[in-house]
Image: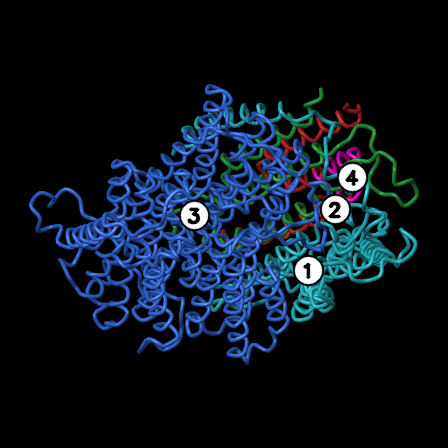
Amino acid sequence: MPSLPVVLPLIAAAVLLAARPLARYRRVLDLVAAGTSAAVAVLLGILIFRTDHASTYWFAGFRPAHGIAVGIAFTVGPLNAGLACVGAILMTAAMVFSWRYFTGVGTYFHVLMLTFLAGLCGFCLTGDVFDLFVWFELMGVSAYALTAYRPEERGPIQGALNFAITNSVGAYLSLTGIALIYGRTGALNMAQIGAWVSRHPPSGLVVIAFVLVIAGLLVKSAIVPFHFWLADAHAVAPTPLCVLFSGVMVELGLYGIARMYWSVFGPGLGHRAAIGRVFLVLGVLTAVVGALYCFRERHVKRLLAFSTISHAGVFLAGFALLSPLGLAGAALYVAGHAFVKAALFLGAGIVLHRLRSVNETWLHGRGRKLPVTGALFTAAALGLADLPPFGTFLGKGWIDDAAGSPAVTIILLACTIVAAGSVLRVAGGVFYGLGDPPREDERMAAEANEETGETDSARQRTPLTMSVPLALLVAAGLATGIAAMVPRAGDALLSAAAQFQAQPQARPADVTVSSVVTGLVSAAGAVGVGLAGLYWRRIPVLRGRYEPGARGTGLADRFQSGVINDYITWVIAGLACLGGVLAAIIRLRGLAPGSRRPWHASDISCRRRSTTRRP
Amino acid sequence: MIEILQAVMLVMVAAGALAVTRARDRVRQVLLLSGYGLLLAILFFTFQAPDVTLSELTVGTVVLPMILLLAIFKVRRGERGREE
Amino acid sequence: MEYFPFVVVAWILAVGLHGIVTSRDLIHTIICLVVVQSSTYVLLLGVGYVTGGVAPYFYDISARTKAVDPVVQALSLTDIVVEAAVTALLLSFAVQAHKRFGTLDPHKLVEFRG
Amino acid sequence: MSPRQRLVLFTVAMAGLAACFAWAVAGLPGFGNYPGPYGPVILHDAVGQTHATGVVSAVNFEYRGFDTVGEEFILFAAAAGLSVVLRRLRDERESRPVDNSNRLPVPDSVRVPALIFTGPTVLIGWWLASHAQTNPSGGFQGGIMLASALILIYLAGEFIAFRRLSPVALLDAVEAVGAGGFAVIGLIALAMGLPYLDNFVPLGTIPGAVSSGGTIPLISFFVGLEVAAAFVAIIGEFGEQTLLVRRS
């Protein structure tokens, strides 16, 4: 059963490729593709509820003997099945959305989408480090090809190349890390490596293998300074694909890092607080950089991409708190964010379909003829700003609770306000014509006007297959928050997080007053930032200096240069810094006592069964 | 322990990698890559991996250079067409 | 001498990455990427090697003979196929980029960014 | 960044990374001292459990067969992606080169040996793909050999013949059968109530015989199909790009 979410899409992809000559019956093929991903979503949904503890599935029936795994295992827990399920739901929405979106394409789009889905599920569920790499690559290859799906446009090839080369370098560095750890432990099963690592004092090998293994994941999850490729790829990829990139692919990278830390390296590395702080700094840095770039963007898809980077930083900060509450908050935030961000991209896709542009400047006021899309887009943007009861507010609230540090709370709050405010600025300007018509920035206009040809069909009205998924996604974003407010559901999530970390669950998951207040403040702040962006020229203090969305600042462009050589240089520099910092922590602080725990042979098959429930 | 043949092949592979990445002419680079694939294949043979040797021989020395050459011809033709 | 193969791995990796960073031609970049990946095969096979071991085939010898690790060989096989697939896809991007923009210099391609 | 700045940053960073790597390698047991336990356990069990004497194939198609499923589909996705990227675009016309030849300018000294070697290459490929369980061979190598045979035809300058031998629809179908077939073999085990990809075919009595290994030769065959079709498709796409001029 746990193998089916991977195998089903693969078989469907093979069938659809063979059915290419039958492209006349497109509707049937569309239905097969969308039906498969919906079925996968249902299967994963069942898996979430059937596994109240992490259960292990051995492929080809090779169960481990004497604590040595010889086959490949899937380790299915509520968190990873849940993440895959969110991915499958977004995939289904994207498939339905692209029903009328692309016309006259063969089945290749569906084939690649399905292989992407299979890679996504395999990546989430696997409990084997090399298998992780394989599914990571499958997801990558499908994503590269899909990014370049419209080679007749000018941008996609450039974006796809940067995406593919940066991610491939990351993946090969990850493989180097896998080989290193295999060379010492002689194991590929995560639990088995984890057991080995926790029985031995942390050595240079373990530290550096950890850094190298997460290299590819850091690139995928767009953590500064590994993030440069993301905006290039998002700006050019077909909109249904952006839904998946922003909604789950980035988050998958973060999940991978969390998984690597908790299941493999973390227990043996020790120095929990110090390592957590390193990742917290990385997360906050990413959140700040993403928010600033988001604010100065006029290309709607690029703007949304930078907001994803900013949010990825918040998620990483949540993981980095290393407590069940922080992880549960991050998980809930990921789910809530996935739905609203997907809705925003679909909204952008509808705008592109109807108005043939994603240039905020040009679109100013032109979206008034799309009232429904405008309302849903605005609602989703408010969801992005953590407005209660969207799932985002509670996730953020838990992260703040777990951080317990006003500084972190305020910085993350500011980042959310700026990023979501920029999105609200777009919503207000485009759909309601608020504010002053912005000055045309020539370069922006030229770039955004490139973006025309995703669709051919009539654009007199928005087809239902486009607006219904959008509405459903906004509703799902709301539902996530409301469901998580039910105490039992919140506790279940928290205990799943505690299980994932093999830690006792310390406290109940509450909806605190402070989280509601923070959410409201955040939403109000975002509206304020959005309005300030729209009425920039009328505000005396701000006038004349700088215009939001204008790309005047050369320094920022020098970083986000679009040159692949720079991106790779940054990857290596970031990795060297991370390696150096972790090495310093381990070397200078010596071995922390009490960080290791005795190891049992039963660890292999099922490591974390016990969780302390709330009395 | 490392055997003499392995050490020799490792040195040659290291030199080969340098040669491949330093070459600036595309066709020359592809030919060097093909040779590098051959060196790798021999190295893998000394590592007692006949399976990998066979794969590296077919992929690294034949198929991949072939694809690269086709791509380079295509690009070169494009460049010539543009000059005219 | 015991660590010489791993030194070579680091060398290949560094040389390949240097090639990518200094490259002014996308096809050159892609070939350097192939070199970067080749370091992983050497590393994999290097860590799985057993001095005096034979290749793990027992068609005509006893299954008790000391042999090198078969797992890393299987992983390398997978790795090689992945390499070929990724390289072919990247090359198709390069061909298309050249067709569209008439250049393979990443610095010039930036001007056409979307 | 200017090239100079980039080089400086790269040099510093790479030095740091190399130092990290050196620190890591110092923790390895040293070349030739692979500590196990994964490899030794497999070496100990493989012949008995799978009746395959080629242990690498046993690992690839049996112990870690699920990796191979993923790897097949990476190739599958790459081939599909290649067709997407290199497909004929809306604004392109297809035309023959001006000199009206659809051949590479290949001298006879290349063409004749190429054609002569085609047959044996096919045979070797076939043999390799069907002996995964015994020798250093298997689906990858066999499949690539089969593809190489078609490259030889191509080298001989017979692109049209190459294309006729491998029309795109047929290649797609073969790829689908190859990659999908592998996945379906796994499903059959599942339908029989066994874990995915379990070896449900009798292993045969003599380890090392052609009919031994249960599903291993079967999977190897499908892998061979997929690999051959994917590589032929990839090379065909590039060949088409090179030989047929498309003008925009």
What segment carries the magenta color?
Answer: B37-52
Whether B51 is among the magenta residues is yes
Q: Whole-percent x and y of residue D79?
A: 61, 59
- Binning the other alpha carbons within 10 Å of mark 2 as few (below 14), some (14 to 19) or many (20 upward) gives many
- The scheme the figure's colours follow is by chain
Disc 4 to disc 1, C-alpha distance: 29 Å
Pick the residue in front: A436 or D90. A436
Label 4 and label 1 in one chain: no
Marker disc for residue B49: 4
Disc 3 to disc 1, C-alpha distance: 46 Å
Residue A384 left/right relative to B67 = left
Disc nearest the viewer among 4 and 1: 1
The residue under label 3 is C109
Marker disc for residue B55: 2
Quadrant containing the N terminus of chain B is top right
The residue under label 1 is D196
